[in-house]
Image (tube, helix red, strand yellow):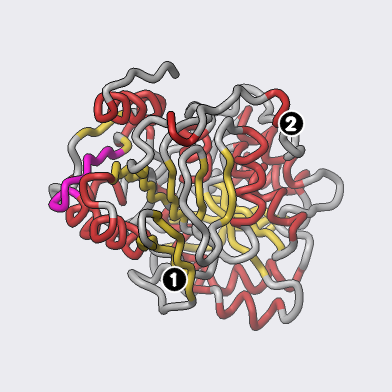
Amino acid sequence: MSKIKVVVVDDSALVRSLLSEIINKQPDMECIGTANDPLQAREMIRELNPDVITLDVEMPKMDGLEFLSRLMRLRPMPVVMVSTLTEQGADTTLRALEMGAVDFVAKPRIGVASGLQALGDEIVEKIRIASKARVSRLVAPPPSPTVPRDDSQQPPARPIGMRLSTEKVICIGASTGGTEAIKEILVELPADSPAIVITQHMPAGFTTSFAARLDSLCKIRVCEASDGQRILPGHAYIAPGGKQFHIARSGANYVAVVDDSPPVNRHKPSVEVLFKSCARVLGPNAIGVMLTGMGADGATAMKEMRDAGSYNFAQDEASCIVFGMPKMAIQAGAVHEVLPLKSIAKALMEKVSSAGGVRHRI
């Protein structure tokens, strides 16, 4: 079996050395070259034809995002970004994912050597996933960075008493490639859509920026979930990175529960945790959606949702970056419909409309 060929691009000699060492310890991959700036990387990619590159966000001579944009327009290939755990680093990383990067690794600001070594298993797993990912050519530059939303431009929402199926809750799980998949669905939903709860595999420090970016783009309101928060129609709640997120009932209301319970399926947040609570608390009021991602997190719980009466969708293989989590949910017998990503938002609203006896326009 041929090894996964990796080129490491980073302006830090220490990081290049550490990443090379981590990669070369794996029996199924090798670091075939390192570059200290994008110009050197460009020549190395032409010469060595790697399967995956790791790319630092902050680079000399050419910004990492600019290099990524050019790469994905001219020679699309799997890229794993190496980002810093800062608010600015999180925003930049989200931009990189919009441009087509498969995934990212968040390196610590201090203790880089020990921090990267501790992240060794995560780094090589993401490289393996990236090597099998579907990447596509970047046709146009993505939107400008997040700006605060102007609610004066938003269409008026129906009063609470007139909302369509206020008891319905859309429950979404995703991993690799999920940030863009979630965005594509949420931007299409109307302001009076049912409540939406989301678990996207993402570390602490990144979900706040992710929620803010979505909130600036969507008709619905989007926020990072907080413990005890009421789950309301017209709002989406994203599991905070590094925490577990599930829902509970408090009287007539659904509320968010955010806690520090252990990882499940090695994930924190875990789709399994959210979907189990949806099966238990929502029953037939749930509509499940499994999007792109590696592994099987959430598949068993999604089957529990179906058994409890929910109606479930999965993203199809052709539109997934990684057809792992949807595939496992389908194999588990958890899914009613398998759809291309671009069709899911419309299907969700049609399902909600039929349940409420009213048709939404989307």
Q: Tell me: residue 347, above or below residue 335.
A: above
As helix, strand or loop, the secondary structure at mark 2 comes to: loop
Label drawn at residue 150: 2
**Residue 153 visible somewhere in the drawing:** yes
Q: Which residues are magenta?
A: 306-314
Residue 247 locus on image (x, y percent): 38, 60
Question: Does 173 appear above or below 315?
Answer: below
Q: Residues within 10 Å of mark 1 (few under 14, many from 20)?
A: some
Relative to the observer, which residue lies in front, 24 or 205?
Answer: 205
Q: Earlier in the sequence, mark 2 or mark 1?
A: 1
For the point 22% across and 49% down, which residue is it?
A: 329
Q: Quadrant of the rendered structure where residue 336 is?
A: top left
On screen, residue 132 above or below 225: above
Q: Residue at x 50, y 45 (%)?
A: 236
Q: Which residue is mark 1?
A: 26
* The stretch drawn in magenta includes residue 201: no
Judged left or right of residue 163, residue 327 is left
